[in-house]
Image (spheres, coloured by chain):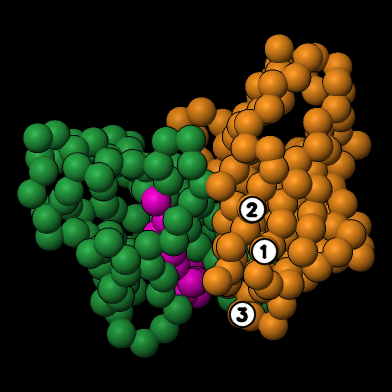
Amino acid sequence: AQSVTQPDIHITVSEGASLELRCNYSYGATPYLFWYVQSPGQGLQLLLKYFSGDTLVQGIKGFEAEFKRSQSSFNLRKPSVHWSDAAEYFCAVVISGGYQKVTFGTGTKLQVIP
Amino acid sequence: GAVVSQHPSRVICKSGTSVKIECRSLDFQATTMFWYRQFPKQSLMLMATSNEGSKATYEQGVEKDKFLINHASLTLSTLTVTSAHPEDSSFYICSARPFGQPEETQYFGPGTRLLVL
């Protein structure tokens, strides 16, 4: 069965420090990959997505993610975290081929300390 | 563009009553809309997929008679939680796929927080 794993439930970083959130997927083929951010009590905002092409994708708010086929990973990075980045981050996949079901990871809650 | 709204943003109701949540695509037509449920500190779980003018497709374990979905137009889908109970309290999020866009494109609404007393 398809699955998305975010091994880190909770991460704390200092403001200004770099950030990397991990995401691994388990599928037979390369899926479409997404990262979403959810602020408390809010819906989801798309940060970035990967469909094909350049494996390093740039998103909004200074985030980027790199697709590594050999590792089945799509880790999210930011070189310098801001206090406003504190939120929950979800990795998600959609399998190509006519079915639009989005499978979400369990999320990583990011805390930013001064 | 590509804005999805939900109404209400939060609702409190008594046990046994029914609650209707609306999901609207404001600036595009959506042939397909999705309903998700998110329990506290957990991920989103797909409940059902609704296509305009046809019956919704429910995920395994989701009671279709309890969670009624109507997708009567290309810009509106509704989720009705019938005879709500406290265990139905959750955060409900919809998403919409614009007509003519790739299958992987979805835009999410801001969510509706339901509390059943």
Chain A colour in the picture: green
Q: Secondary structure at mark 1?
A: loop
Q: CA distance from mark 1 to mark 2?
A: 7 Å
Of discs 3 and 2, which sits in the foreground?
A: 2
For residue B102, the mark is: 3
The local crowd at label 1, few if under 14, some if 14 to 19, many if 20 or more residues have their Cα within 10 Å, is some
Q: Residue at x 28, y 53 (%)?
A: A22
Q: Residue at x 73, y 72 (%)?
A: B29
Q: Which residue is denoted by mark 1 in the rendering?
A: B26
Labels 1 & 2 near each other (Cβ < 8 A): yes
The answer to whether dots 1 and 2 both sit on one chain is: yes
Left or right: B98 as drawn, with respect to A53: right
| Label 3 residue SS | loop
Give the CA separation, mark 3 to mark 2: 21 Å
Q: Colour of chain B?
A: orange
How far across and how far down the image is residue A46, in percent? 44, 61
Residue B46, given in percent of the width and then of the height, sits at 65, 48
Comparing marks 1 and 3, which lies closer to the viewer? 1
Q: Is residue B110 left or right of residue A109?
A: right
- Determine which of the numbered discs, if any, sits on residue A105 in the image: none
Residue under label 2: B5
Q: Chain of mark 1?
A: B
Which amino acid, by three-letter code, is at mark 1? Leu
Q: Callout 3: residue from which chain? A: B
- Left or right: B36 as drawn, with respect to B53: left
Q: Earlier in the sequence, mark 1 or mark 2?
A: 2
Circle 2 chain: B
Residue B1, given in percent of the width and then of the height, sits at 55, 71
| Residue range highlighted in magenta | A25-37
Q: Secondary structure at mark 2?
A: strand
- Point 89% across, 59% down: residue: B72
Of labels 1 and 3, earlier in sequence is 1
